[in-house]
Amino acid sequence: MTVAPFTLGRLPTLSRSTVDRQETLRTNPERLRARWPDAQVMLLDKQLRTPVREGEAVLATRKALMFGEEPPADAVFLGEWQGVDYWSLPGEPDGEPEIVEVPGSWGVPEEAPRVDGELWVTLRAHGDQLDDTAAGLFTTAQALRVWHRQARFCVRDGSPTHLVQFGWASKCEACGREEYPRTDPAIICLVHNEEGVNGEHVLLARQPVWPPGRYSVLAGFVEAGESLEGCCVREIREEVGADVHDVRYLGSQPWPFPRSIMLGFAAKADASRPLVPADGEIEAALWVPRAEVRAAFEAKGRPVPILGGASELILPGNSSIARVMLEAWAYAERG
């Protein structure tokens, strides 16, 4: 039997979406205003949290008419799904909410306001617990809110700007120049050794600022004039001193922290050559056998010993494409 190179077994969490977000919808103000009375609005607070009903996989949206007879100036159109328009507006929890602990990214708890059966949660910690529609809406709303914070002045002459196209463009009040949401491309590359088609060991690394035991695959931003494959080769050589080959594309995921899209790749490298972690950027890098990565998945966020107990392994959180990549590799066919 021929063993095929591994592929992603499922869509990355934040790549899921159902809404129709085509440009013709957001450039048709008559249509949007006419449908506003039946629209739904998701709120984002200053910490980029949104309310969800406890124990449910959907957003706790509000009726649009709660905010006026037509879309407010700061309303952002997110898209249409099953005959309903969805928007985003700034909003904060009502009154004095109870602060509770909820599971966060990488298994680290985080605080969330709770009011009337609603939890105000972050995308990074809660995105994997939402259905496809909610995950897509939350990801889009956060990406646009972050861009709005950074697009208040014209890049040409420094004049103030205002939002147009219902949140999808900014326009300079002096020269009329229009700008559109920016996305920074970044590669994230799973490197395995050369044994068989899919390897038997994967290259993992950790940053100095991460909690003990946290490891992931390597990533970095694409430079000007650089191909995606070239970025994989350069970043991995710079970060751990490994020379990779057979670079191939796996999939992508928006990552609005603050404004990236993660482009996932796989590659091979010689595991017998010494690793050289970049000073100040990579604290440790190591080759981890497949069995120990599987054990970490089965531990469901609890640290597991690796390398004969010399270290501990905590894998990336459920909202990250890194987890989907590692999961696909760990349970791929061997050979």
Image (cartoon, rainbow, N blue to C red):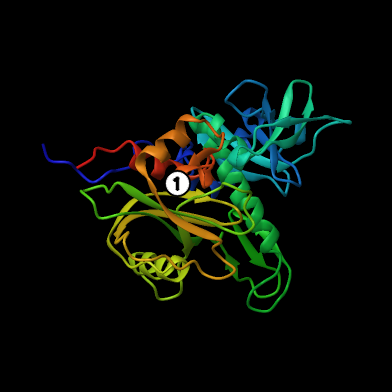
Q: Residue furthest right?
A: 96
**Counting other residues with Cα less than 10 Å from the Cα at mark 1, is it few (<14), some (14-19), or many (20 or more)?**
few
Identify the image quadrant of the N terminus: top left
Q: Is residue 282 visible?
A: yes
Image vertical order of residue 260 relative to residue 292, above or below:
below
Identify the image quadrant of the C terminus: top left
On the image, the x and y values in percent for residue 100 come to: 77, 29
Q: Residue furthest bottom?
A: 157
On the image, the x and y values in percent for residue 66 come to: 76, 30
Horizontally, is 124 left or right of 268 in the view? right
Task: State the residue at coordinates (40%, 35%).
Answer: 294
Task: State the residue at coordinates (61%, 48%).
Answer: 212
Task: State the residue at coordinates (63%, 28%).
Answer: 38
Image vertical order of residue 238 relative to residue 253, above or below:
below
On the image, the x and y values in percent for residue 288 come to: 40, 48
| Residue type indicated by callout 1 | Leu
Image vertical order of residue 193 relative to residue 38, above or below:
below
Q: Which quarter of the figure has residue 135?
A: top right
Q: Nearer the viewer, residue 302 or 332?
A: 302
Residue behind mark 1: 307
